[in-house]
Image (cartoon, grey):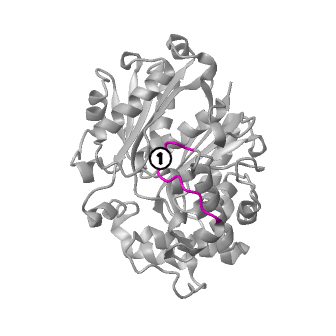
């Protein structure tokens, strides 16, 4: 990863943006990222566009990337559409770095966008139906829900409203961690409360209301132990990242000192393992590769953004990235270790639970936050002295874990 940089980032507000089109969102994010980098559309040599729902919801079942880029003013260059479920945006970023390393161009663009809030709620939730092997749906359910067996949900802790089956799957992962390590519902709620407090200071976040741990626990139930504030919402939004090599950085008209170095970018797919083999977890394997590639270790990390489609995700991924030992994520969250000002700040953006989760834009939105942190420009949510950042973004489910995980390591110059 010698001499690969993030020169510019751009992101729309995430939220329920009913009045805005996908092309409108893409245009804003791309324009912001190019302006941030001191670039024009003519400077970009390749573009990678991430989305999961443009086909299902907007009917753009083919070539969403080339069309979105043409609307954004990018013409006559290679454009690729990327789909890796919730890891789509980070996968697009990884491909942009590969294009640079291969010498295909000096400046590349990764973009992600979704317009997920639609009138047909049944269709809206159906977007997640393809997030696992659709040829073995009942087997998938049985295997994943069995992870949480042996812990009966207390009365009144399961929602009567219809939600995605993946909420039950996330709850099963919670219960397994609770049985295995003694993690408590309060510790999981501490993650959500912390992230909602962080999001108060993020003007681009979907939700900007602080909650106490008690309020999170008392909120409407989803699937024990998860309550509503512990879960990411349905979101619209877009994010973009301009990536370049040393030659590209010299051509850009932005301030070179604000460029952030990409020390590592690793994509990992899963393999067969037992639920009781944490050291073979996909995110853990990706993190080990990323740290080795970057030449740093978890002790060097100052700030992290991790995939928290539910609050439990932050605990699991903090452990997999070796920011805390396996089994100690819950107590660390309750102590405040993951809070800005704590020992290991995680998700200062507010995380997916608060910032929002427009699937194709999610990973790039996380990178937007980390670049902002490493530049020292995050305002009241700034992690003091942040120099090295870790990023984890997972997508889909295969077997008993994510189908794909991307881990990136960034550093300030």
- How many numbered tags mark residues here? 1
Q: Please identify the quarter of the rendering in which residue 42 is found.
A: top left
At a point 26% along the width and 53% down the height, the residue shown is 57
At a point 34% along the width and 65% down the height, the residue shown is 134
Q: Residue 30 at what x, y percent from top left? A: 40, 30
Asked if residue 143 can be seen in this view, the reply is yes
Asked if residue 102 can be seen in this view, the reply is no
Left or right of residue 380: residue 14? left
Q: Residue 304: within the magenta?
A: no
Q: Residue 322 at what x, y percent from top left? A: 72, 52
At a point 63% along the width and 67% down the height, the residue shown is 189
Left or right of residue 293: residue 237? left
| Magenta region | 202-212
At mark 1, the secondary structure is helix
Left or right of residue 347: residue 34? left
- Is 194 placed above or below 383 here? below
**Label 1, residues with CA under 10 Å away: few <14, some 14-19, many ≥20:** many
Residue with the mark numbered 1: 362
- Is 43 placed above or below 189 here? above
Q: Residue 144 at what x, y percent from top left? A: 50, 73
Magenta-colored segment: predominant secondary structure: loop
The C terminus, quarter of image: top right
Is 74 in front, or is 187? 187
């Amino acid at each position: 990863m010698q001499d690969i940089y993030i020169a510019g980032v751009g992101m729309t507000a995430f939220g329920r943006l009913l009045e805005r089109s996908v092309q409108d969102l893409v245009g804003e994010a791309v324009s912001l990222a190019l302006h941030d980098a001191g670039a024009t559309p003519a400077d970009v040599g390749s573009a990678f566009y991430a989305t999961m729902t443009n086909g299902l919801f907007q009917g753009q079942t083919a070539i969403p990337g080339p069309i979105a880029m043409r609307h954004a003013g990018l013409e006559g260059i290679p454009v690729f559409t990327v789909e890796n479920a919730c890891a789509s945006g980070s996968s697009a970023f990884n491909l942009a770095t590969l294009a640079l390393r291969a010498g295909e161009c000096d400046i590349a663009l990764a973009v992600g966008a979704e317009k997920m809030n639609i009138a047909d709620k049944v269709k809206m939730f159906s977007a997640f139906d393809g997030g696992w092997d659709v040829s073995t749906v009942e087997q998938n359910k049985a295997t994943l829900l069995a992870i949480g067996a042996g812990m009966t949900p207390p009365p009144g802790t399961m929602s009567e409203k219809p939600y995605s089956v993946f909420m039950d799957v996330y709850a099963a992962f919670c219960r397994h961690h609770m049985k295995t390590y003694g993690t408590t519902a309060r510790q999981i709620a501490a993650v959500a409360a912390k992230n909602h407090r962080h999001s108060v200071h993020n003007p681009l976040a979907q939700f900007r209301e602080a909650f106490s741990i008690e309020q999170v626990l008392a909120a409407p139930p989803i699937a024990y132990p998860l309550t509503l504030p512990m879960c990411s919402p349905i979101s619209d939004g877009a994010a973009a990242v301009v990536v370049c090599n040393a030659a590209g950085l010299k051509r850009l008209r932005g301030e070179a000192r604000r460029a952030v170095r990409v020390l590592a970018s690793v994509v990992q797919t899963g393999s067969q393992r037992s639920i009781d083999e944490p050291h073979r977890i996909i995110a853990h394997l990706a993190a080990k590769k990323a740290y080795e590639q970057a030449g740093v270790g978890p002790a060097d990390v100052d700030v992290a953004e991790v995939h928290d489609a539910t609050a439990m995700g932050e605990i699991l991924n903090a452990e997999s990235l070796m920011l805390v030992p396996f089994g100690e994520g819950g107590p660390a969250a309750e102590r405040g270790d993951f809070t800005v000002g704590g020992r290991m700040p995680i998700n200062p953006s507010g995380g997916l639970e608060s910032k929002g989760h427009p699937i194709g834009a999610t990973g790039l939105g996380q990178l937007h936050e980390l670049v902002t942190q490493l530049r020292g420009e995050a305002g009241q949510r700034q992690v003091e002295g942040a120099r090295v950042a870790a990023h984890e973004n997972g997508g889909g489910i295969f077997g008993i874990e994510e189908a794909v995980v991307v881990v990136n390591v960034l550093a300030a110059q």
